[in-house]
Image (tube, grey):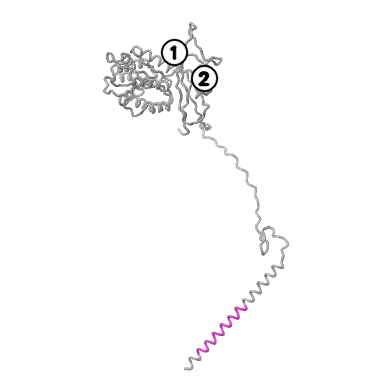
Amino acid sequence: MRVPCLRISAVATVALLVSQTLLLAGTSWAQQTDQQQNQNQTQNQNQQPSTPPAAGGPGNDNGPIALPRRTVTPAPPPPPPPNIKNPPGLGNLSMRVNVPVVNVDVGVLTEKTHQFIPNLQEDNFRVFENGVPQPIIGFEQVKAPITAVLLLEFASNSWYFIQDMWQAAWSFTQQLEPQDYVAVVTYDMHTNILTDFTQNKSVIQNAIESLQLPTWNETNVFDALYTTLDRLSRIPGRKYIILVGSGIDTFSRIDLDKVLEKIKETPNVTIFTISTGGFARALGGMAGGIPNSIGMLQADNEMQTYARMTGGMWFEPRFQAEFPDIFQQINASIRNQYQLTYRPTDTKMDGTYRRIRIELVDAEGQPLRMENEKHKPVKYLIVARDGYKAQLPVQ
C-alpha cells in the first residue's frame, strides 16, 4: 500500500519543479524585451534628423515619411488631323439643311373672257403672307402638261344632272394633250376608279362612255373628295381635280370641316368645280325642274369654297353649249401660269395655316392698270390659292 503513494508524491514534485522553471523563464524574457524597447525609444528621441528626406513628405510622430518624388513628363503633342480621301469616283460629301420654301402658281386672267395675260415680269408681283411682304426668290412663266383627276358625280338626282356630267366629261377629254396624265373617278355612295392615270385618250373616253344609268340617288361628295386628295398627296408635282357634280352630300362619313382641313393639308393641288343641273334649277320646279332650295345653295357655296381655297375656279353652267368654253378657261388657267417662289420670313414650323395674298403693281409700286388696244381699262383676276399649312418639326 505504501508503494503507490510514494510514486504519486514523486510525480507531483517533478511537475511543480517544471512549472516554476517555466514561470521564471517567461518573467526574464519579458523584462529583457521591455528593456530593449525602452533603449530603442531613447535612441530615437535623441537622434534629431538634420534634413528631411530628399523626396520630401509630411512628418509623423516618429519623423518625416519619405514619399517617392513624381516626375512630371510633358504631354505629347496632338496627332495631326487625318487626311481622309474619298474612294475614286466619289465626290466630296456635303450636308444640306432643308430650308422651307413656298411655291405659288398664279393665274392672271381677264375678268370678262378669262384669257391668260402673258408677259408680266417679276417686279409686277407682290406676295404677302399673313399680311407681311415676302421676298420673291424665284419667278417663271410655265406651260406644262397636267396631272388631273376627273371626279364625276354619277347619281340619278335628275336626268339634267347626268346630261351635264356627260357633256362636261366629254368636253374635257377633247382638250387633252398627248403629255397629259388623267384619271377618271366616279362617286355616288362609294368612290370608284374607272381608270388610273393614263396618257391614252381613248382609254379615258371609253371609261366615260361606260357610264350608263346610275343606280343610286345618294351622293357622298365629302368622302369622294377626301379620298381623292389623300391619293393625290402621294404623287409629286402639281395636281388638279376637276370636280363635276351637284355638290350635294347625303351620307358621307367625313364632314365638311374635315374636308376643308384636308384641302389645307394637301399641297400642290388645285380644284376646279362645275355645278351640274343649272338648267333644271333655272326651271324652278316647272317641267321636272329642281328649285333652288337651301340645300342647293349650300352646295354651291361649298363648291365655290373648294375652288377658292386652292386657286381654282367655280362654274355654274345652265346650257350644255357652255361646257367647251368652260374647259377652255380651265386649260388657259392650268397650262399658262406664273410660278412664284419665296422663302417665308416666319420660319416657325408650327403647323399653322398661313394666308397668301398676291398683288400686281407697276414700276412705281402702285396697283397695276391694264388697257386693251383701244386704250380702255381691262379688269383682271388673280387666281391663286389662299394659303398653305406650315410644316411641323417632325413631318
Circle 1 SS class: loop
* Along the line of sight, the residue nearer the viewer: 2 or 116: 116
* Along the line of sight, the residue nearer the viewer: 348 or 202: 348
Q: CA distance from mark 1 to mark 2?
A: 20 Å
Q: Which mark is residue 111?
A: 1
**Residue at 64% across / 76% down in the picture?**
32
Position of 290 with respect to 42 (left or right) is left
Give the image location of residue 336, x and y in percent: 44, 16
Circle 2 residues within 10 Å: few <14, some 14–19, many ≥20: some
Residue 77, visible in the rendered structure: yes
Circle 2 SS class: strand
Indicate whether 163 appears above or below 58: above
Give the image location of residue 287, x and y in percent: 27, 13
* Along the line of sight, the residue nearer the viewer: 190 or 94: 190
Give the image location of residue 324, x and y in percent: 36, 13
* Amino acid type, label 2: Arg
Q: Which mark is residue 126?
A: 2
The quadrant in which residue 318 appears is top left
Residue 245, visible in the rendered structure: no
* Amino acid type, label 1: Glu
Indicate whether 272 appears above or below 48: above
Q: Residue furthest right?
A: 50
Give the quadrant of the C terminus: top left
Sequence-wise first label, 1 or 2? 1
**Residue at 27% across / 21% down in the picture?**
214
Predominant SS along the magenta part: helix
Q: Residue furthest bottom?
A: 1
Q: Which residues are magenta?
A: 7-28
Indicate whether 67 appears above or below 91: below
